[in-house]
Amino acid sequence: MWRLFHFPLCPFSRKVRLLLSEKGVPYELQRVEPWSAGDEFYALNPAGRTPVLHDAEKNRTLCDSRAICEYFEETVEQAPMINGTAVNRAEIRRLTALFDENFYGDVTAPLMHERMKKRLFLREPPNSGILREAMKNAHAHLDYIDWLIDTRAWLAGPTKSMADLAAAAQISVADYLGGIDWAGHEQSRDWYFTFKCRPSFRPLLAEKMEGIHPPAHYAQLDVD
Amino acid sequence: MWRLFHFPLCPFSRKVRLLLSEKGVPYELQRVEPWSAGDEFYALNPAGRTPVLHDAEKNRTLCDSRAICEYFEETVEQAPMINGTAVNRAEIRRLTALFDENFYGDVTAPLMHERMKKRLFLREPPNSGILREAMKNAHAHLDYIDWLIDTRAWLAGPTKSMADLAAAAQISVADYLGGIDWAGHEQSRDWYFTFKCRPSFRPLLAEKMEGIHPPAHYAQLDVD
């Protein structure tokens, strides 16, 4: 069976977990903190990052969240997430990269640094200027999601895709860390709410990072 | 015809140019500096990054270097760069991400910041500590490439792939900026040299960024 090396607030591990659940691929979890991982983890992934999927019986290792998702898209027919014409697929991959790279760099990564790493092992207070900037950036990204949802059923087109999984994964971590203010973003909030209610999302919402508490609305399944 | 928005030292634009040339896809270049780009460029790519490919006649825009490369892999049969089994393809995509993200973050990005952005528009001296660290990181990455080339014909397996194009694109920018010391990396140097000699690579080596001069060996086509 596949074993997923992850940690609870890794947005890229969350994206892979959403995909595996939607596609019905069984896996077990192994927690690892990449910032204090040992040689065994680096032997599996020289990039030293989560997520890593490893199948010990088949001696098979998959690294990098996008490479992992493409692999399951190619090998498991259920719940296609990169489908349509080549142009549709390019749009799905463009938006996946936008959330994996820009949203992560602008919002998720600074929140994780200030509110997770500093609290758990740097033992420093968060920088309020950086937090304000991250939350301002989150508003700009939510504005863009609002606009996408105004013009399409799902973020990349008429069907749910990797773009939705990538966005929901990033937002879920940012929301856990108190970085998302949903006021004024009804379209984004409704789109995210339909995600939160899916069986694939429940295990993520139930998982906690010790010492860091999400806001009350984080795991709520009713729109207030 | 496709128009590629790029700047000469953008490693991701270089990767796309290598792929388009290998696949025989015609395109014209339009230079843009993303850090001072106007609304027109952001309208094409909300991520505000190069490369962007735009076909005005067909009103078609492709953004994100990996999404662009997957698009041409799907639509142009010549010179396949993501081929083989699903496992082979996962390995190609893992290494492409390793060079696009880790090599870029560890080596290319700090070199570009210290030796390009600071010289061209921040008007600050480079930070020698950051430069030393980037060059140390480059050695670690070249060690890994040496090891790959010891065990495989090309970086990801028996045939040339996107992994080779991604690595060569990053290295070419780092080499232009004086960040690559080839001493002790014969395997990497020989592998890179075969790349430099390809017709697809020549236009990149000929291109200059005003005010920044590459070292003498940068465009040389003979191993000293």
Image (cartoon, coloured by chain):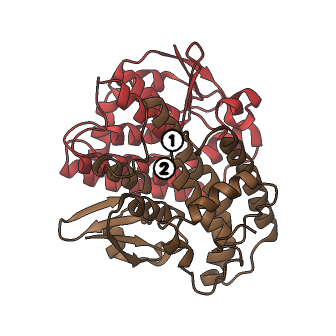
Chain colours: A red, B brown
Q: Give the number of the disc on residue B209.
A: none
User: Image quadrant for the C terminus of chain A?
Assistant: top left
Q: Position of residue B121 (x, y in %)?
A: 60, 83
**Residue at left offset 63%, top offset 23%:** A31
- Amino acid type of the residue tagged 2 in the rendering: Met
- Residue found at the far bottom of this picture: B211
Q: Position of residue A12 (x, y in %)?
A: 51, 37
The reply to whether label 2 and label 1 mark residues of one chain is yes
Q: Position of residue B206 (x, y in %)?
A: 54, 78
Pointer 2 chain = B
Q: CA distance from mark 2 to mark 1?
A: 7 Å
**Residue at left offset 46%, top offset 37%:** B89
Pointer 1 chain = B
- Amino acid type of the residue tagged 1 in the rendering: Ile
**Residue at left offset 37%, top offset 70%:** B4
Q: Position of residue B186 (x, y in %)?
A: 75, 55
- The number of numbered discs placed on residues in the rendered structure image is 2
Q: Give the number of the disc on residue B162.
A: 2
Q: Give the number of the disc on residue B92.
A: 1
Q: Are marks 2 and 1 in contact (CB under 8 Å)?
A: yes
Q: Is residue A118 left or right of residue B153?
A: right
Sequence-first tag of 2 and 1:
1
Disc 1, SS: helix
- The answer to which of A115 and B142 lies nearer the viewer is B142
Q: Residues within 10 Å of mark 2 (few under 14, many from 20)?
A: many
Q: Quadrant of residue A209?
A: top right
Q: Residues within 10 Å of mark 1 (few under 14, many from 20)?
A: many
